[in-house]
Amino acid sequence: MAVVDLLELPALLPRYAAVVGLDLGEKTIGVAVSDAGRSIASPLSLIRKTRFTDDFAALTKLMESREAQAIVIGLPVNMDGTEGARAQSCRAFARNVLRVKDLPIAFWDERMSSMAINRMLIDEADTTRARRAEVVDKAAAAWILQGALDRLRNARA
C-alpha cells in the first residue's frame, strides 16, 4: 500500500475493520483505535519511543490485538498551513512503516489537538499536571482519529 488520501481509505479496507490513530511525539506515540465500523475512536495506549524497530513492534502488536488494518497519523501542520520539522518526522515515520508492512496510511491535520485535549483535561476533568502528562498523547491520538472518522462519515452522507 502507500500513503493515501483519507477519503480513499474506506475503499482499501474491508467493510468492518478497525483503524488506529497515532499522535507522534518526540518521546512517545499516542495510540487510539476505532471500532470495527469506524464510528468511534478510543484512546488505547502510549508507546515510549526507543528505536523504530521496537516502536513498530509494539504498534504492530496493538494493531493485531484490535485487528486494525490501517493507520491515521496526526500531521502537525503549522498554523499557516506549512509543514515544519515535526511534520517531516511524521512523514518519515510513515515511510519507515511502509518499508516493513504493507498497509494503507493516511494523514490528518492535527493542529490544536494537544492544546484542545489539555484544555479539556484542565477545564472539564480538573486533571492534575502529572495525570495529564500520562494521558494527553493517547487522548490526542483519539482526538485525531475521531476527526478523521467524522470526515469519512460526512463524506458518505
Image: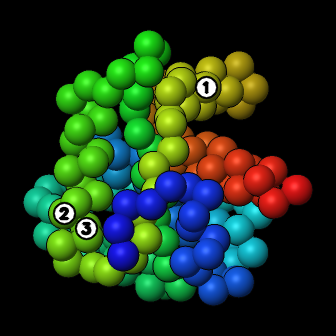
- Residue pointed to by mark 3: 97
- Residue pointed to by mark 2: 96
Considering only vertical position in the picture, is 21 above or below 111? Answer: below
- The reply to whether discs 2 and 3 touch (Cβ–Cβ < 8 Å) is yes
Q: Which amino acid does label 3 sit on?
A: Val
Mark 3 or mark 1: whose residue is earlier in sequence: 3
- Residue pointed to by mark 1: 116
Q: Quadrant of residue 17?
A: bottom right
Q: What residue is rendered at 28% in x and 58% in y?
A: 94
Q: Which amino acid does label 1 sit on?
A: Ala
Q: Distance between the residues labelled 3 and 1?
A: 28 Å
Residue 80 pos. (x, y %): 44, 13
Residue 26 visible within the image: no
Depth order, front residue of 89/104: 104
Q: How far apart are marks 2 and 1 (CA)?
A: 29 Å
Q: How far apart are marks 2 and 3 (CA)?
A: 4 Å
Local secondary structure at mark 1: helix
